[in-house]
Image (spheres, rainbow, N blue to C red):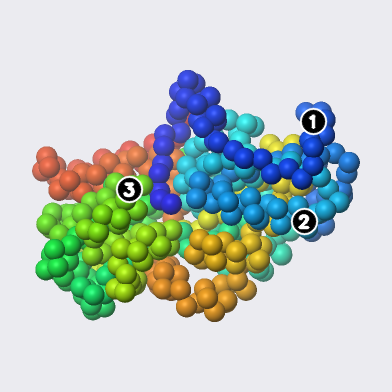
Amino acid sequence: MKRKMISLLLSAAMVATLMAGCSNTSTSNAEPAAQADAGDQSEAPATDAAPAASTETIKLTVWAAEEDQDLTNELINGFKEANKDQTFDITVGVESESTAKDTILVDPEAAADVFAFASDQITDLVNAKVLQPVQDVETISSENGKNAVVAATINDTLYAYPMSADNGYFLYYDSSIISEEEAGSWDTLLAACDKAGKKAGMVMASGWYNAGFFFGAGFTCAANEDGSTTLDWNGTSATGVKGTDVLAGMLDISTNSAFLPITDGDTANQIATGTLGAIISGTWDASAVKDAFGDGYAATVLPKFKCGGQDIQMGSVAGYKMIGVNANSKQVGWAMELAKYLTNEESQITRFTQREIGPSNIKAAEAPEVKENIAIIAVTNQNNAYGVVQMAGGNYWEPSKSLGEIIAQGNPDGTDLQELLDNTVEAVAQPVAQ
């Protein structure tokens, strides 16, 4: 899943296409009753209690990623079974967590009642007043890991239900050609891949992935209320590293013949080609990497890279996935109950069993099968030791992507590195047009 950010400023002609593009399936446990009057809303519960059952058919729409459609429908059937006294008509539509915010902000009132999204989108969703605050804060906070709860919280208000704690990236490698020690640095990793006639790949043209180099060097990224982003990458970090040295280190990697720059969204296809000996990705590609590497399947934290004459450990975005409830929902009370169910301990274990998605739920994360999973161990170690919860405004993504594209291509125009960074910092500092 894979970070895909599209422009917030979609033309009016695209609006209908985007919304119609959310294909859906309906899971109804009864014939739909007459639709309630548009002004008839279920109120969000003031306590942990579910809304009282009624004779009305509760209609809800849920958005989930394409690869999660069967799983989501299965979980919804469990929700219906747990609420037999109420009749539901629940439709499941396709929307990636990585693009949820952009689609929702086109027309929040037409968006799903319940939707999955990546944690770095929460600031823009809150600013747009799309997210319904969580009511049973104590329960959700106590059941999930601290960092996952922090990622779902803005200004001391919990706005979403944590769903997973593994939305980060780490290094997969083929241990039949790369030793554990060689996997520890880009220099030795690339050398081992070259010797074996393989490539080491990553997505550089993405502000989600390439931020890892800067975070490792002590630089920061902060979202502002106007949708702009404050970056310090064009200066010197608190640890004394120059931003230009970080870019130079990235260029050393991208210009190595054993490096393969991958387009965001194309990682699984590249894995399937069999040309890779190592790849930076996340748990969503675990099955594909297992098939490609076979008995050599291994994973670990990100490698170190050369920067200004020193070895610097790559950082990463310690991301989370969560479920949000649309504040515009006509059935906000039941929408919150469904969101809570889709993220509870049992649902998170089911999600791990079927999709190897790492739980944010504390009890689910303690299950032996979770704690022994190679990919989960790697992302947990990376997030805990080197991960940063990234908060970025809407105007961060395109400039940071463009910066990464230039570096991935080897800076073909020979642009001064300081100029590249200055331009990026200036571009992300622009407020999002309302």
Q: Is residue 50 found left or right of 365 in the rendered image?
A: right
Q: Nearer the viewer, residue 46 or 239?
A: 46
Which residue matches tag 3?
Answer: 266
Name the residue: 42% across, 34% down: 7
| Element type where label 3 sits in the image | loop
Horizontal and vertical percent for residue 142? 67, 69
Name the residue: 68% across, 52% down: 76
Q: Residues within 10 Å of mark 3 (few under 14, many from 20)?
A: few
Quarter holding residue 129: top right
Which is more N-terminal, label 2 or label 1? Answer: 1
Amino acid tagged 2: Glu
Quarter holding residue 39: top right
**Residue contact between numbered discs 1 and 2, judged by CB atoms under 8 Å:** no
| Element type where label 1 sits in the image | loop
* Real-space Cα separation, disc 1 to disc 3, in angstroms: 42 Å
Q: Residues within 10 Å of mark 2 (few under 14, many from 20)?
A: few
Name the residue: 73% across, 43% down: 28
* Real-space Cα separation, disc 2 to disc 3, in angstroms: 38 Å
Horizontal and vertical percent for residue 156? 63, 56
Can residue 315 be seen here? The reply is no
* Real-space Cα separation, disc 1 to disc 2, in angstroms: 22 Å
Front position among marks 2 and 3: 2
Q: Nearer the viewer, residue 390 or 378?
A: 378
Horizontal and vertical percent for residue 240? 25, 65
Q: Residues within 10 Å of mark 1 (few under 14, many from 20)?
A: few
Name the residue: 17% across, 66% down: 193
Which is more N-terminal, label 3 or label 2? Answer: 2
Which residue matches tag 1?
Answer: 35
Which residue matches tag 2?
Answer: 81
Can residue 76 be seen here? The reply is yes
